[in-house]
Image (cartoon, grey):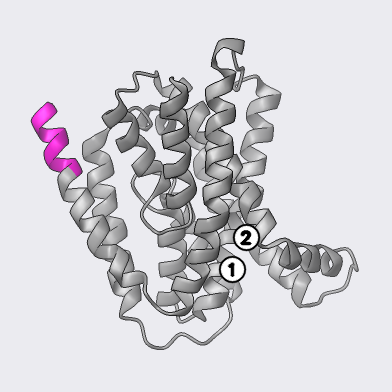
Amino acid sequence: MELFDAVVLGIIQGLTEFLPVSSSGHLELGKAILGDNSVPEESLMFTVVLHFATALSTIVVFRKDIIELLVGLFSFKWNEQTKFSFKIILSMIPAVFVGLVFEEELEALFGGNVILVGFMLIVTGLLLFLAGRARHTGKAVSWKDALIIGISQAIAILPGVSRSGATISTSVLLGNDRTKAARFSFLMVVPLIIGKIAKDLLSGDLVVESTSSWPLIAGFIAAFVTGLIACTWMISLVKRAKLHYFSYYCFAVGILAIAAGSLSA
């Protein structure tokens, strides 16, 4: 992969990880447009590195919340911080299960399947449209909500389904406060990404050749910086109930992706 391509894909990842338009889907479309011929395993490695960059940007933006949660958790009392932390753990279970059981099948999907990305973007758009019309959004995330949101996150492993779009939309449709929905959505993914990186490092799946390290570094930096900007912007957009505007974008890009994929098939 060329250095320029890595930076472009890093910027795409940084913006679309937090904006509800599917980072994985846009990465696959970006690779197709840039002519990236990586095999699925190499493509997945680059995707994981970029996701780690945006996870780091999430930690920076929500550093005060994370410190508060850790302090509450390690006080060893059943307080609100401890409950919130365990709800995050509960929400991780579906994605962990799907990731472990269907790992090989999922890896094969990250290889420029433009038509699949198109259909999944339309699914994302539908969720965002419905969430944009939700009116009763004032309650906190319950245990049941955490599990349902976790199932949405598991489905969002598919390229083209926005993780933030799916989880925030699901939370809003369940009647949760929009700001709390965004906070829960962004914090719940951090342990998963860090766990995925650790697993791949320990298993030797992420072996980086010296000739390909610079594009990875460049992509990481680009994703981290743009992620900081996009995360802050997205929090503001969710507060102002602007999610449904992104649905039109997802519909348009999804249809274009399906058409382009069909013509090149």
> On the image, which quarter does residue 142 sit in?
bottom right
Report the span colored magenta.
257-265
Contact flag, marks 2 and 1 (Cβ < 8 Å): yes
Would residue 47 be found to the left or right of residue 26 on screen?
right
Would residue 265 be found to the left or right of residue 169 on screen?
left
188 and 251: which is toward the camera: 251
Q: Residues within 10 Å of mark 2 (few under 14, many from 20)?
A: some
User: Residue at point 52% right, 27% down?
Assistant: 45
Q: Position of residue 13 (x, y in %)?
A: 46, 43
User: Residue at point 56% right, 11% down?
Assistant: 211
Three-letter amino acid code of the residue under disc 1 = Arg
21 inside magenta stretch = no
Residue underneath mark 1: 183
Which numbered dot is residue 187?
Answer: 2
Could you tell me how many numbered marks the image carries?
2
Q: Position of residue 101 (x, y in %)?
A: 51, 36
User: Residue at point 45% right, 51% down?
Assistant: 15
Q: Main secondary structure of the magenta part?
A: helix
User: Is residue 159 at least partly visible in the picture?
Assistant: no
Q: Which image quadrant: the N terminus?
A: top left
User: Is residue 173 at least partly visible in the picture?
Assistant: yes
On screen, residue 190 above or below 26: below
